[in-house]
Image (cartoon, rainbow, N blue to C red):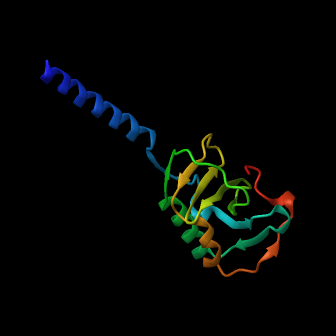
Amino acid sequence: MKKRLLALAVILGLLLSLSLASCARTVYIELPFEPADLDAVEMFRFQNLAEAEKKVITDPADVKDLCDLLESISLKDKKTEPVAGGSVTSFRFHCADGTTYEVIYSAIAVKSGRIKITGWETDYFTSADLGACWNNYDYPVTDAAESELPALY
Protein backbone atom coordinates (compact mmCIF):
# COMPACT_ATOMS: atom_id res chain seq x y z
CA MET A 1 0.00 0.00 0.00
CA LYS A 2 2.80 2.42 0.91
CA LYS A 3 4.56 1.66 -2.37
CA ARG A 4 1.39 2.46 -4.35
CA LEU A 5 0.89 5.72 -2.49
CA LEU A 6 4.52 6.64 -3.05
CA ALA A 7 4.26 5.78 -6.76
CA LEU A 8 1.06 7.82 -7.04
CA ALA A 9 2.71 10.78 -5.29
CA VAL A 10 5.69 10.59 -7.66
CA ILE A 11 3.43 10.45 -10.72
CA LEU A 12 1.33 13.38 -9.50
CA GLY A 13 4.50 15.34 -8.79
CA LEU A 14 5.78 14.71 -12.32
CA LEU A 15 2.45 15.72 -13.85
CA LEU A 16 2.43 18.93 -11.80
CA SER A 17 6.00 19.70 -12.85
CA LEU A 18 5.18 19.18 -16.51
CA SER A 19 2.06 21.32 -16.35
CA LEU A 20 3.93 24.16 -14.63
CA ALA A 21 6.77 23.98 -17.14
CA SER A 22 4.35 24.19 -20.06
CA CYS A 23 2.66 27.27 -18.57
CA ALA A 24 5.91 29.22 -18.63
CA ARG A 25 7.10 28.12 -22.06
CA THR A 26 9.73 30.25 -23.74
CA VAL A 27 9.02 31.90 -27.09
CA TYR A 28 11.03 34.21 -29.31
CA ILE A 29 10.07 37.06 -31.60
CA GLU A 30 10.17 36.14 -35.26
CA LEU A 31 9.97 39.37 -37.23
CA PRO A 32 7.90 38.94 -40.43
CA PHE A 33 10.47 40.78 -42.55
CA GLU A 34 14.18 40.96 -43.18
CA PRO A 35 16.14 44.02 -42.01
CA ALA A 36 16.92 44.82 -45.67
CA ASP A 37 13.15 45.17 -46.29
CA LEU A 38 12.93 48.16 -43.93
CA ASP A 39 13.10 51.84 -44.78
CA ALA A 40 13.44 52.94 -41.14
CA VAL A 41 12.61 52.14 -37.53
CA GLU A 42 10.98 54.72 -35.28
CA MET A 43 11.94 54.26 -31.65
CA PHE A 44 9.76 55.91 -29.01
CA ARG A 45 10.39 56.36 -25.30
CA PHE A 46 8.14 57.80 -22.60
CA GLN A 47 6.87 57.57 -19.07
CA ASN A 48 4.40 60.37 -19.54
CA LEU A 49 2.62 60.57 -22.90
CA ALA A 50 3.07 64.35 -23.00
CA GLU A 51 6.86 63.96 -22.78
CA ALA A 52 7.34 61.22 -25.39
CA GLU A 53 10.54 61.25 -27.44
CA LYS A 54 11.41 59.68 -30.76
CA LYS A 55 14.46 58.61 -32.75
CA VAL A 56 14.40 57.45 -36.37
CA ILE A 57 16.94 54.71 -37.08
CA THR A 58 17.95 54.59 -40.73
CA ASP A 59 21.46 53.12 -40.96
CA PRO A 60 21.10 49.53 -42.31
CA ALA A 61 23.69 48.21 -39.83
CA ASP A 62 21.77 49.71 -36.89
CA VAL A 63 18.45 48.41 -38.24
CA LYS A 64 19.92 44.89 -38.53
CA ASP A 65 21.43 45.15 -35.03
CA LEU A 66 18.04 46.11 -33.57
CA CYS A 67 16.23 43.29 -35.42
CA ASP A 68 18.84 40.78 -34.23
CA LEU A 69 18.47 42.04 -30.65
CA LEU A 70 14.69 41.67 -30.68
CA GLU A 71 14.83 38.17 -32.18
CA SER A 72 17.37 37.04 -29.56
CA ILE A 73 15.42 37.83 -26.39
CA SER A 74 13.40 35.13 -24.67
CA LEU A 75 9.78 35.74 -23.75
CA LYS A 76 7.62 33.91 -21.24
CA ASP A 77 3.86 33.74 -20.81
CA LYS A 78 4.07 34.82 -17.17
CA LYS A 79 1.63 36.87 -15.14
CA THR A 80 2.96 40.17 -13.80
CA GLU A 81 1.40 43.20 -12.24
CA PRO A 82 1.24 46.44 -14.24
CA VAL A 83 3.41 49.27 -12.95
CA ALA A 84 2.00 52.76 -12.72
CA GLY A 85 4.40 55.29 -14.22
CA GLY A 86 6.62 52.65 -15.80
CA SER A 87 8.62 53.58 -18.86
CA VAL A 88 7.69 52.45 -22.36
CA THR A 89 10.14 51.90 -25.22
CA SER A 90 8.61 50.95 -28.54
CA PHE A 91 9.71 50.26 -32.07
CA ARG A 92 7.74 50.90 -35.27
CA PHE A 93 9.24 49.15 -38.26
CA HIS A 94 8.49 50.77 -41.63
CA CYS A 95 8.71 48.22 -44.44
CA ALA A 96 9.50 49.26 -48.00
CA ASP A 97 6.08 47.90 -49.10
CA GLY A 98 4.32 50.45 -46.84
CA THR A 99 3.36 48.12 -43.99
CA THR A 100 4.32 48.78 -40.39
CA TYR A 101 4.99 46.46 -37.48
CA GLU A 102 5.22 47.41 -33.80
CA VAL A 103 6.99 46.00 -30.76
CA ILE A 104 6.17 47.69 -27.45
CA TYR A 105 8.17 47.15 -24.26
CA SER A 106 6.66 48.32 -20.95
CA ALA A 107 9.06 48.17 -18.02
CA ILE A 108 7.68 46.52 -14.87
CA ALA A 109 10.91 46.47 -12.86
CA VAL A 110 14.60 47.09 -13.36
CA LYS A 111 15.67 45.09 -16.43
CA SER A 112 12.34 43.38 -17.02
CA GLY A 113 9.07 44.17 -18.69
CA ARG A 114 6.20 43.10 -20.90
CA ILE A 115 6.26 42.99 -24.68
CA LYS A 116 3.26 43.49 -26.98
CA ILE A 117 3.68 42.76 -30.67
CA THR A 118 1.58 43.50 -33.75
CA GLY A 119 -0.57 40.48 -34.55
CA TRP A 120 0.05 38.62 -31.28
CA GLU A 121 -2.94 38.11 -29.00
CA THR A 122 -0.82 37.70 -25.86
CA ASP A 123 1.75 40.04 -24.39
CA TYR A 124 4.80 38.36 -22.90
CA PHE A 125 7.22 38.87 -20.01
CA THR A 126 10.93 39.31 -20.66
CA SER A 127 13.89 39.82 -18.38
CA ALA A 128 15.66 41.73 -21.17
CA ASP A 129 16.06 45.46 -20.61
CA LEU A 130 14.85 46.82 -23.94
CA GLY A 131 14.56 50.30 -22.47
CA ALA A 132 18.36 50.46 -22.27
CA CYS A 133 18.75 50.09 -26.03
CA TRP A 134 17.54 53.70 -26.45
CA ASN A 135 21.11 54.75 -25.67
CA ASN A 136 22.62 52.29 -28.16
CA TYR A 137 21.59 54.33 -31.19
CA ASP A 138 23.01 57.81 -31.72
CA TYR A 139 20.29 59.64 -33.66
CA PRO A 140 18.64 63.00 -33.08
CA VAL A 141 15.93 62.95 -30.43
CA THR A 142 12.71 64.81 -31.22
CA ASP A 143 9.44 65.27 -29.35
CA ALA A 144 6.75 62.77 -30.33
CA ALA A 145 3.11 63.75 -30.47
CA GLU A 146 0.68 61.52 -28.61
CA SER A 147 -0.95 60.66 -31.95
CA GLU A 148 2.36 59.18 -33.16
CA LEU A 149 2.70 56.72 -30.28
CA PRO A 150 2.09 53.03 -30.82
CA ALA A 151 -1.49 51.94 -31.31
CA LEU A 152 -1.00 48.79 -29.24
CA TYR A 153 -0.28 50.66 -26.03
Q: Position of residue 73 (x, y in %)?
A: 49, 60
User: Quick check: 33 above or below 55?
Assistant: above
- Quarter holding the N terminus is top left
Left or right of 140, for residue 11: left
User: Quick check: 74 above or below 134?
Assistant: above
The tally of labels here is 0
Q: Position of residue 80 (x, y in %)?
A: 58, 48
Q: Residue at x 83, y 68 (%)?
A: 51
Q: Position of residue 108 (x, y in %)?
A: 62, 58
Left or right of 97, for residue 19: left
Q: Residue at x 62, y 40 (%)?
A: 121
Where is residue 66, by image quadrant? bottom right
Q: Position of residue 55 (x, y in %)?
A: 74, 73
| Residue at the top extreme, as displayed | 1
Q: Residue at x 54, y 61 (%)?
A: 70
Foreground pick, 30 / 12: 12
Left or right of 77, for residue 140: right
Where is residue 90, by image quadrant? bottom right
| Residue at the front extreme, as displayed | 2
User: Quick check: 26 above or below 7?
Assistant: below
Q: Residue at x 60, y 74 (%)?
A: 62
Foreground pick, 58 / 29: 29
